[in-house]
Image: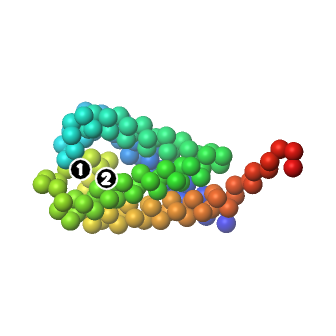
Amino acid sequence: MDLLSKLPSALLILLWIYTGLDKVLRWEVSKNAFHNQTFPVELADVLAYAVPITELLIALLLLFSVTRWWGHLASILLLTVFTTYVGLIWVGAFPRVPCNCAGILESLGWLEHLILNLLFIALAVVGLKQSQNKKPEAVAPGL
């Protein structure tokens, strides 16, 4: 049962390390992909750095029990942003179809990408509930 309780964190750690390192290792490709997005160039410059750093930091948060709750929460938030963006692309809200997906995720269609993101959000919610149940209650000093 203990292994099952660690599965959401482990899968999310793999996701964030894979996507974050892919952007770092293929820096020029990743940076150009951010510049191909539908948002302003200035934002693309910031996101080119912020996204892989954030992905790797979330993986780090998920590694330690003391920060795991925050890692799950951050996963939910970032995946929700990504999923909303993918959903908008899928319904044709943008004039062109950009992508800054990592490695094998580039081969997914938009619907598959949306479903995969929703599955990872569900995993993060399960992990959040599990880590919330394991959090020790704060004890006020002097009580």
Three-letter residue code for mark 1: Cys
> How many labels were placed on the picture?
2
**Image position, residue 136 (x, y; %):** 74, 54
Q: Return the residue nearer the eye: 109 or 67.
A: 67
- Residue placed under numbered mark 1 in the picture: 99
Say which quadrant the N terminus sits in. bottom right
**Image position, residue 68 (x, y; %):** 60, 50
Q: Nearer the viewer, mark 1 or mark 2?
A: 1
Residue 113 in view in this figure: no
Residue occupying image coordinates x 27% and y 47% = 100
Residue occupying image coordinates x 25% and y 56% = 107
**Image position, residue 62 (x, y; %):** 56, 48
Residue 82 horizontal side relative to residue 40, left or right: right
**In the rendering, which numbered label is found on residue 104?**
2
Residue 116 horizontal side relative to residue 39, left or right: right
Three-letter residue code for mark 2: Ile
Q: Is residue 136 above or below residue 32?
A: below
Farthest-out residue, left: 95
Q: Return the residue nearer the eye: 32 or 26.
A: 32
Residue 42 in view in this figure: yes
Q: Secondary structure at mark 2?
A: helix
Residue occupying image coordinates x 29% and y 49% = 101
